[in-house]
Image (cartoon, helix red, strand yellow):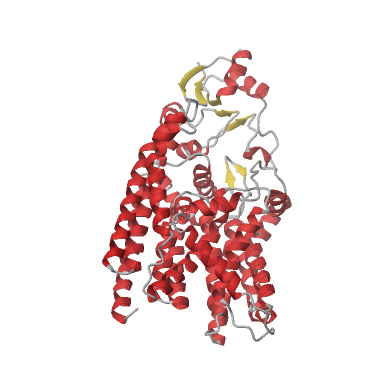
């Protein structure tokens, strides 16, 4: 790429970054919180700020130490500046998702050049798995960012062009990213880099690499970042630390206790579908890196192989989580950024050779657009009714709109290639259309939010609930409702996540609730639909204020 072309693409990079920030923030402001996860990760930092307890996270007034506190800290601080609004609760996730794209671009420029960096960033910002999950208030985008930062810093430190000072600086940044990754989501931030390092060193027989980790400085960095919160947690109550370290890592990984059972190949299929239309390009480059880069050498005399390191990292993530007894779609997001870098590198190489490099991408984009376009009529024609029919109808229009956008972007990319404007111009058009289509799908998630939980219940309850009014959650707990009401509820026979944590008398039994309800002159309850017959059987006096699909709000008559 000429100097003039590089300047042009630097300007375009700033425009793309501005688009990412603006489109993401506008989309965020249009969306409601989705039950349960977004409500949970909005409510915990709200309670952290309200209680001024920055050591033990709480949910509904109970200790909730399933995850470390970094995202809670960041969100609570954002609340203190911008207010405790739903759109504020997503900012940490959204901004780290954008930061991940910027990091891939910056590292790609140093490693492979401007063309590869631009292609990698465009691919990452339009990979559906990365974009869709990164728009939801979960912990996984934060973990993905810190693990990606650790990988990129490690690669920049170990590349042969790095001098001693650069290697030390990049490695300390790598250790910092690992420590922050622990504070984001726990021991996974140690496991994935450690396994990937051992696998790479074994494949290359490069034991000298283990001596270039600046281990002493790294341990010091980890100690400063990790120990203060962990020690304080243990001092507050040793059961908290035991639950967090043992149950939430080893028990969750090794058992099916959380009922998230999927076959071993599950994450392979998630990766294939979640990276469309870039999947074939990504996987082919990873396979080529693994085949061509594994050579036997003399320890200490082996050049550091950047493509192999990226491919090993991606494979490690997929295999590691495939071995887990608990599987959820977002877990393998850390595999996507290195695959995007490999794909961007391949596009740059083929562009330099006068080829497009999009031989598999455009047909898959066309297929993706067509599938999205026909999804609603096909599903509605096959569906025979049932509880999911409203969901199909709700998401159909946004799927259709997204499909049209993908097809338009595919047509634009093909046209740009026919004009001979270069592969990056075609990738830019396709990536922006894919990104916009995904944002349309995410914004359309409001229709799903309206089908889950008790939408609008906060408005109904705020008129009835006074500070002294008892508020019960019978057989249920809705995180989004708790956040909207800014108050806790008294749990009754709730067998979900809040049952487990170190409080006597929680939840109430139905008989205890009945005694309190009968003695009260004013009370309100959110009741799971399955519990209403039990309340009638117990002859409890109540009046149904409003009914939802799975819940009812009842008041003391």
State the image coordinates of residue 477 (x, y, percent, origin top left): 56, 34
Direction from residue 447 to residue 226 in the image, left or right: right
Direction from residue 486 to residue 258 in the image, left or right: right
Residue 92 appearing in the image: yes
Looking at the image, is 513 positioned above or below residue 423? above
State the image coordinates of residue 463 (x, y, percent, origin top left): 41, 28
Task: Decide which of 325, 524 is in the foreground and name it.
Answer: 325
Task: Decide which of 142, 120 is in the foreground and name it.
Answer: 120
Direction from residue 103 to residue 188 in the image, left or right: right
Looking at the image, is 150 positioned above or below residue 209? above
State the image coordinates of residue 472 (x, y, percent, origin top left): 56, 28
The residue positioned 57% from the left and 76% from the top of the image is: 172
The residue positioned 58% from the left and 31% from the top of the image is: 476
Q: Quadrant of the N terminus?
A: bottom left
State the image coordinates of residue 353 (x, y, percent, origin top left): 39, 76
Task: Decide which of 37, 212 is in the foreground and name it.
Answer: 212
**Number of disc labels:** 0
Q: Residue furthest left?
A: 419
Task: Decide which of 378, 65 is in the foreground and name it.
Answer: 378
Residue 175 appearing in the image: no
Q: Quadrant of residue 203?
A: bottom right
């Amino acid at each position: 790429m000429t100097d003039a072309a590089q300047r042009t693409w630097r300007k375009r990079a700033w425009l793309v970054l501005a688009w990412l920030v603006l489109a993401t923030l506008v989309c965020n402001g249009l969306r409601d919180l989705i039950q349960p996860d977004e409500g949970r990760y909005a409510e915990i930092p709200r309670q952290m700020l309200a209680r001024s307890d920055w050591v033990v996270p709480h949910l509904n007034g109970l200790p909730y130490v399933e995850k470390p506190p970094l995202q809670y800290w960041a969100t609570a601080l954002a609340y203190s500046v911008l207010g405790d609004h739903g759109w504020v609760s997503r900012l940490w996730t959204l901004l780290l998702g954008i930061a991940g794209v910027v990091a891939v671009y910056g590292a790609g420029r140093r490693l492979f050049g401007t063309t590869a960096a631009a292609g990698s960033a465009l691919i990452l910002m339009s990979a559906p798995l990365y974009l869709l999950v990164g728009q939801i208030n979960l912990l996984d985008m934060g973990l993905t960012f810190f693990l990606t930062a650790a990988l990129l810093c490690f690669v920049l430190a170990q590349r042969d062009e790095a001098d001693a000072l650069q290697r030390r600086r990049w490695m300390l940044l790598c250790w910092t990213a690992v420590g922050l990754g622990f504070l984001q989501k726990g021991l996974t931030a140690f496991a994935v880099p450690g396994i990937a390092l051992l696998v790479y060193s074994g494949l290359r027989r490069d034991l000298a690499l283990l001596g270039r980790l600046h281990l002493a400085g790294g341990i010091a960095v980890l100690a400063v970042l990790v120990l203060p919160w962990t020690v304080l947690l243990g001092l507050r109550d040793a059961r908290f630390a035991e639950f967090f370290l043992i149950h939430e890592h080893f028990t969750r990984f090794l058992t099916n206790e959380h009922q998230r059972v999927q076959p071993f190949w599950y994450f392979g299929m998630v990766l294939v579908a979640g990276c469309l239309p870039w999947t074939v390009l990504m996987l082919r480059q990873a396979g080529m890196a693994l085949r061509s880069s594994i050579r036997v050498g003399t320890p200490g005399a082996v050049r550091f192989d950047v493509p192999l390191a990226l491919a090993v990292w991606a494979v490690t993530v997929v295999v590691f989580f495939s071995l887990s007894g608990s599987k959820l779609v977002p877990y393998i997001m850390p595999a996507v950024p290195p695959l995007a870098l490999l794909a961007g590198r391949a596009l740059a190489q083929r562009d330099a050779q006068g080829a497009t490099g999009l031989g598999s991408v455009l047909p898959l984009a066309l297929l993706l657009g067509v599938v999205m376009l026909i999804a609603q009529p096909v599903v509605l024609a096959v569906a025979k009714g049932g509880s999911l029919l409203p969901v199909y109808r709700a998401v159909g229009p946004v799927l259709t709109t997204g499909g049209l956008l993908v097809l338009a972007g595919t047509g634009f990319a093909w046209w740009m290639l026919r004009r001979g404007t270069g592969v990056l111009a075609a990738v830019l058009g396709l990536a922006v259309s894919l990104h916009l289509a995904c944002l349309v799908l995410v914004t359309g998630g409001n229709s799903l939010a309206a089908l889950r939980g008790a939408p609008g219940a906060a408005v109904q309850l705020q008129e009835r609930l006074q500070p002294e009014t008892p508020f019960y959650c019978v057989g249920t707990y809705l995180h989004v409702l708790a956040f909207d009401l800014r108050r806790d509820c008294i749990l009754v026979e709730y067998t979900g996540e809040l049952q487990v944590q170190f409080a006597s008398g929680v939840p109430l039994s139905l008989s205890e609730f009945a005694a309190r309800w009968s003695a009260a002159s004013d009370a309100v309850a959110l009741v799971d639909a399955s519990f209403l017959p039990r309340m009638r059987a117990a002859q409890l006096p109540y009046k149904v204020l409003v009914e939802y699909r799975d819940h009812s709000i009842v008041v003391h008559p």
